[in-house]
Amino acid sequence: MPENRKSIIESLKKDDLILKNENGKYSITNLGAILFAKKLDEFNSLKRKAIRVIQYKDNSKIETIKEIIKELSGNKGYTVGFEGLINYINNTLPSNEIIKDALNENKISIYDESVGTRARTYVPRWSK
């Protein structure tokens, strides 16, 4: 991450996230807005580009259980709303419960956040 304002602006220009206008001011590009906007609704061309999560009943994609669009991230840009998106998905995924005693219970998600993939469950051959 650049340390001073000038370096940050140059980095944003290089990545096509902002453009310098003739009057010396800067405008955000659609890419910059869709990544960093706090409210996508403020950009006419991006209003319908909000993050969308669809939960289907099974693998056929015929029946929808739940579809979340605006409520999920508050209609934020992809980068700004990413943490909320991941939290929502983790809370939606099934989890395995391990009961240690009658009072304490731990839930282990079948999704491994550190790898970004579902955790594999080991089933020994002799248990089949």
Image: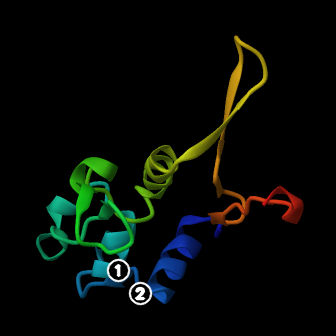
**Secondary structure of the residue carrying numbered label 2:** loop
**Secondary structure of the residue carrying numbered label 1:** helix
Where does residue 61 sit, x and y in percent of width and height?
A: 29, 73
Give how far apart the Cα atoms at labels 2 and 1 are: 7 Å
Q: Mark 1 is on which residue type?
A: Leu
Classify 10 Å Cα crowding around label 1: few (below 14), some (14-19), many (20 and above): some
Q: Residue at 33% x, 51% y: name it.
A: 73
Q: State the residue in front, 18 or 122.
A: 122
Q: Mark 2 is on which residue type?
A: Asp
Q: Which residue is mark 1?
A: 31
Where does residue 63 sit, x and y in percent of width and height?
A: 23, 64
Q: Give the number of the mark in front: 2 or 1.
A: 1
Where does residue 52 sit, x and y in percent of width and height?
A: 29, 64
Contact between marks 2 and 1 (CB within 8 A): the answer is: yes
State which quadrant residue 34 falls in.
Answer: bottom left
Which circle marks residue 87 in the picture?
A: none
Q: Residue at 39% x, 72% y: name it.
A: 59
State which quadrant residue 75 falls in.
Answer: bottom left
Quadrant showing the N terminus: bottom right
- Taking the view exactly as shown, the residue that stands out farthest to the left is 44
Q: Which residue is mark 2?
A: 16
> Can I make out residue 97 in this image?
yes
Classify 10 Å Cα crowding around label 2: few (below 14), some (14-19), many (20 and above): some
Where does residue 25 sit, x and y in percent of width and height?
A: 29, 75
State which quadrant residue 17 falls in.
Answer: bottom left
Q: Residue at 48% x, 43% y: name it.
A: 91
Please determine whether, in this image, residue 87 is positioned above or below residue 1: above
Q: Residue at 14% x, 77% y: name it.
A: 45
In primary-sequence order, the first of circles 2 and 1 is 2
Please determine whether, in this image, residue 119 is positioned above or below residue 6: above
Quadrant showing the C terminus: bottom right
